[in-house]
Image (tube, rainbow, N blue to C red):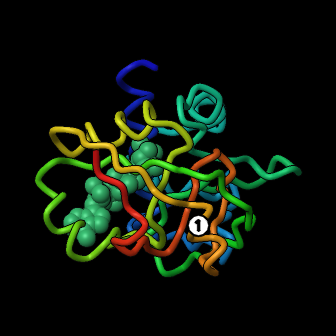
Amino acid sequence: MNKNLNELSKFLSYILRHQPESIGIHLDSDGWVNIEYLVEQANKHNQFLTKEILYQIVETSDKKRFTISENGLEIRAAQGHSTKQVNINHIESTPPEYLYHGTASRFIESIKKEGLISGQRHYVHLSRDQQTAGAVGQRHGKPVVIKIKALLMYQQGYKFYLSDNGVWLVKNVPGEFLIFD
Ligand code: HQG
């Protein structure tokens, strides 16, 4: 993805996950917004965006961060929200025996005390494989991958959700389900 598209992708993530009000738009509770309206409002706030560019960002997103609705008229971020406007009904699903969480070494002490918490976001994000988790952890510093006893959690009543783009979501992970190597 070229630099400009990458920057616009970050802008879209910011608007569709965190601060829709910063360009005067409102997301529905499932996170959707009309594409034409989004493009219009983005331009009003000095972001040069067209429908064509938006489709290009969606198609080239390495993590498939954005989803276009079936009728092609709306867009939403697949996961990662912090905005209170949104409360997506993600698909509840049975997790595999283990899932992985990538973080930075400086957070480990606190995670050992509190377990994994979602912070600003609505959920803790878990990955299906260690490699993906490693890449997530790298964003924050020296990466550490934590193994999660996901199926055991599920059997004990914790709900797991699978987002449109394959990220596993859970409200929190208490320390007893974490495995540190
Ligand atoms: C850490 C990316 C201290 C947690 C990725 C993480 C992901 C704690 C940080 C998505 C803690 C939150 C989300 C505790 C958790 N004490 N630190 N008790 N519990 N943490 O960015 O999971 O590229 O909100 O380990 O692919 O890193 O944006 O979450 O390091 O799916 O599309 O608190 O973002 O996607 O950081 O990343 P974040 P995340 P995009």
Q: Secondary structure at mark 1?
A: helix
Horizontally, residue 43 falls left or right of residue 31, namely left
Q: Nearer the viewer, residue 172 or 67?
A: 172
Which residue is painted at 46% across and 20% down in the image? 1
| Amino acid on which the number 1 mark rests in the picture | Leu
Q: Please tell me whether residue 144 is drawn above or below residue 116 in the rendered image.
A: above
Horizontally, residue 145 falls left or right of residue 97, namely left
Task: Quarter of the image for the C terminus: give it.
Answer: top left
Which residue is painted at 35% across and 23% down in the image? 3
Q: Which residue is mark 1?
A: 152
Residue at the limit of the structure toward the top, as seen here: 2
Q: Nearer the viewer, residue 48 or 148?
A: 148
Is there any visible trace of residue 136 in the rendered image? yes
Q: Please tell me whether residue 12 is drawn above or below residue 32 in the rendered image.
A: above
Q: Residue 97 placed where, x, y %?
A: 61, 52
Which residue is painted at 26% across and 40% down in the image? 139
